[in-house]
Amino acid sequence: MALVEVQVPDIGDFDEVTVIELMVKVGDTVKAEQSLITVESDKASMEIPSSTAGVVKEMRIALGDKVKQGSVVLVVEATGAAAAPADVPATPAAAPAAAVAAPAPAIAPVAAAPVAAASGPVEVHVPDIGDFKDVVVIEVMVKPGDTIKVEQSLITVESDKASMEIPSSHAGVLKELKVKVGDTVNIGDLLAILEGTVAAAAPVAVAVAAAPAAPVAVASAPAAAPTPVAAAVAAVAAPAHAPGGTTLGLPHASPSVRKFARELGVPLAEVKGSGLKGRITEADVQAFTQAVMSGAAQTKAQAAKAPAASGGDGAALGLIPWPKVDFAKFGPIERKEMGRIKKISGANLLRNAIMIPAVTNHDDADITDLEAFRVSTNKENEKSGVKVTMLAFLIKACVSALKKYPEFNSSLDGDALVYKSYWHIGFAADTPNGLMVPVIRDCDKKGVLQISQEMGELAKKARDGKLGPAEMTGATFTISSLGGIGGKYFTPIINAPEVAILGVCKSTMEPVWDGKQFVPRLMLPLSLTWDHRVIDGAAAARFNAFLGQILSDFRRVLL
Ligand code: CAO
């Protein structure tokens, strides 16, 4: 069977258009007039159809390529007839097909430079948009009061074959807009009234007096009655999306919005459209960008790199997909979006849980004497208003253990360990918005009372949502205390780039063997999670044992 090169047909005055979508691949069977690629200028997008049926043997263009009339799109092993009768001059033998299918201009000339001046109100009408009748206004790009330039796009209209932007024939201030989203318009319809108008767009507009401006993105043959050839041309100019929200692979948006998104690097397929039939507007792209920049949303690419709180889809890790369950099938449900802090901390926790080979050691510390000391200290300090909880003593005890075992106060940096000569301790705080970790700086230089006071202040700020970034960064080690709530042991997740975290649960009176008898002792459950890349099991056991010794006799802090 014959190999046929399918070319870009006559697409009017547009010299070079960009390939923005490939709709077929090598091996696909295509029908005559089936859309092969979508191309886009700054004013219109259109699909290029196949002139012949067959099997795609070779793609000759790639995404982003610039093409023009005659560019070879692909090579098809033909199985059927060409799409339309060849009523145009013969083309070279090797490239006949597509050119045959599209003899008429798909896009009429853009208006020439301004030629006429006016001062009073000027009506702007729908220009010649070819064979397209009753096209729907899907986007209004201007509002009363806007200063409009000649050829500035005013609205986007869409037929079932193409979407196009309608430009202004004059410059001036927009006094009145005569159409709204959802209206249907035809050639000659009044679009807008401008005032203070300075120039008309083109000789064409002038020639038809106050009537239509020069067409810009018309996707049809000239005004002649539809013919089989014109029908083929209409197919040439098919839009990336059929109206009604049915996408053919591209987001539902006008060329200018797509261009805007490309400039910002916004993946348009991930933007939710708020326009008619879900069409994406410039404002949608802006809102998406703001959400990503503020951390409130992630692109799919970001999610693949740093899985989201919910775990993304796990595809980046080669995992099977997250189960999708229609919970409503089993009973009443209510869906609530997670808050910003939960989303951010969730993504961090997931990364840390997945990336760190973490091990947790559990141990108990005898805090009988320390608790008695704490209670008496609080009694003595009743008037000062500063209450000391076990967590403040734990912070101080941890600093001693971190000094004795410095790798616990380090961070991994590639193949190197960064040892820090400062001891800033983070503590997990439960807040109405989610988990936060305020940081108390230089705990080695502060006493338990000062630590208690700062902890109280930072915890309050965290609950009030008033913590600044500086108060949540720079920790060298973190303590997560559930002591005020309950529980026995748990496995805290390391707060990267730290290498260890101490989990603390509620102390309980327990019978402890003293060598001769069981005696009641207040025991504090400790859970130390550590990064096995940095810390060995023996070091972790020693750290816990040392911490236990300090807590059982706090005078050791002084040693
Ligand atoms: N054993 C027994 N009682 C304890 C205790 C312990 N280990 N730790 C604290 N308590 C007691 C306190 O003495 C206090 O008792 P009184 O009111 O009778 O004096 C009570 O529990 C409440 O303490 P607290 O929780 O207000 O104070 P804290 O210093 O222990 O903790 C803070 C402060 C901010 C860490 C805590 O309020 C908090 O938010 N904890 C939750 C942390 C968290 O969510 N961790 C999990 C992270 S992983 O998801």
Image (cartoon, rainbow, N blue to C red):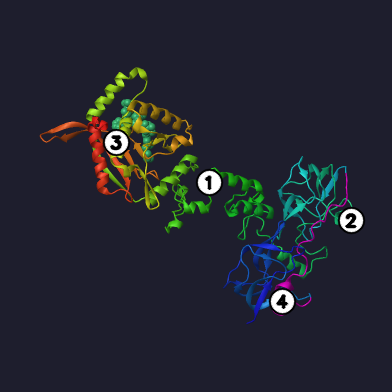
Pointer 3: what residue? 400
Residue type for callout 4: Pro
Tag on residue 207?
Answer: 2
Residue type for callout 3: Ser
| Farthest left residue in view | 516
Which of the two marks, 3 or 4, is nearer to us in this view? 3
Q: Quadrant of the C terminus?
A: top left
Depth check: give the residue in front, 410 or 49: 410
Tag on residue 96?
Answer: 4
- The range drawn in magenta is 89-118
Q: Residues within 10 Å of mark 2 (few under 14, many from 20)?
A: few
Residue type for callout 2: Ala
- Secondary structure beneath label 3: helix
- Secondary structure beneath label 2: helix
Q: Give the mark nearest the N terminus, 1 or 4.
A: 4
Report x, y in % for residue 487.
Answer: 30, 37
State the CA–CA distance, disc 1 to disc 4.
49 Å
Q: Residues within 10 Å of mark 1 (few under 14, many from 20)?
A: some
State the CA–CA distance, disc 3 to disc 4.
84 Å
Q: Are marks 1 and 4 in contact (CB under 8 Å)?
A: no
Tag on residue 412?
Answer: none
Q: Are marks 2 and 4 in contact (CB under 8 Å)?
A: no
State the CA–CA distance, disc 3 to disc 1.
41 Å
Which of the two marks, 3 or 1, is nearer to us in this view? 3
Ligand 1, seen in the image, is in the quarter at top left
State the CA–CA distance, disc 3 to disc 2.
90 Å
Q: Are marks 3 and 2 in contact (CB under 8 Å)?
A: no
